[in-house]
Amino acid sequence: MPVKAIKIIKQGNLSWEAFEEPEIHIMAMKRLTGTGGGSTVTYIESDAKILVDTGFEYESDRSAENVKRNKKNLVHALKDMDLKPSDIDIVFITHWHYDHFGNLGAFKKSRILASKPLEGFKVEAVKDGEAIADGVQVVYTPGHTAEHASLLLKTEKLRYSMRNERGGGSIMGIGSVEVAVAGDAIIAPSYYMMDRLWDRNPNFHSTEKGIESVRKLEEKADYIIPGHGGIFKNVKKAS
């Protein structure tokens, strides 16, 4: 059974887009207006219910107050999709940066998967190319970090029902598509379109490997869900 549903639970954001200079006053303005820099959190439904990354806003603030606020916001976002943490079978972590796994403690009953374990968590290591559910394949994407991994999804034939103000509507056929849940291998649409990598993290691994990882996803995906942003059409995929 291929993937039957994909939902963005929380849409991540960035301190600096690819076209912005990494100036501190830009980040300060974004923080002031509510841009906390947390990752995108994606829900996948196949023969298992999967969450990709858990997000965490204002990652440098590890105070009890901010931890509580982050957990509360994620639980509410899940509730909006008629989900709760105990419904999630698998949490897949793309890489071990706190803005991507800071809410992991909310998922006490879920299997935690990643390419590499992290001390303090019961993590199952997954291999490149491994299917973790029907239509859900692991793709190693080193570059942003050495252990970074993404998911490539194959969906069933999707459709979207649109309603109008008169109470009628129409059904838009989408078809079967491949979707890359990229994590920070493709951090945001602006970086992808400008052929740039986010290399500001202290443990950035390799520009060469990062470019190779982007190409892996670019060749396969019809749509891309980046590490910090919403889904977008992969306009670079060869037809």
Image (tube, rainbow, N blue to C red):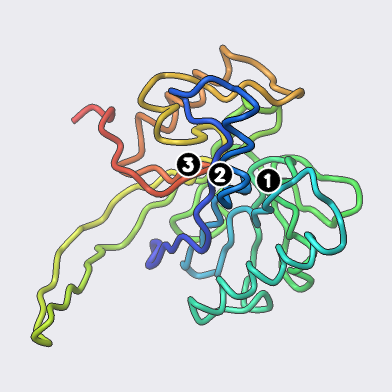
Image location (x, y in percent) of residue 79: 56, 79
- The residue beneath circle 2 is 138
Give the camera-side residue of 122 and 22.
22
- The residue beneath circle 3 is 226
Pick the quarter of the image with the C terminus: top left
The extreme right residue here reads: 120
Image location (x, y in percent) of residue 233: 29, 42
Examine the rendered structure and indicate whether residue 213 appears above or below residue 159.
above
Image location (x, y in percent) of residue 177: 29, 51
In which quarter of the view is residue 27 placed? top right
In which quarter of the view is residue 234 placed? top left
Q: How far apart are marks 3 and 1 (CA)?
A: 21 Å
Q: Could you tell me which residue is drawn at 58 percent across and 46 percent down?
A: 130
Image location (x, y in percent) of residue 88: 62, 71
Pick the quarter of the image with the N terminus: bottom left
Q: Could you tell me which residue is drawn at 73 percent across and 66 percent down?
A: 69
Give the camera-side residue of 115 and 6.
6
Q: Residues within 10 Å of mark 3 (few under 14, many from 20)?
A: many
The kind of secondary structure element at disc 3 is strand
Proximity of marks 3 and 1: CB atoms separated by less than 8 Å = no
Q: What residue type is labelled 2?
A: Val
- The residue beneath circle 1 is 126
Q: Distance between the residues labelled 3 and 2?
A: 15 Å
Q: Could you tell me which residue is drawn at 64 percent across and 15 percent down?
A: 206
- Give whichever of discs 3 and 2 has the lower sequence position: 2
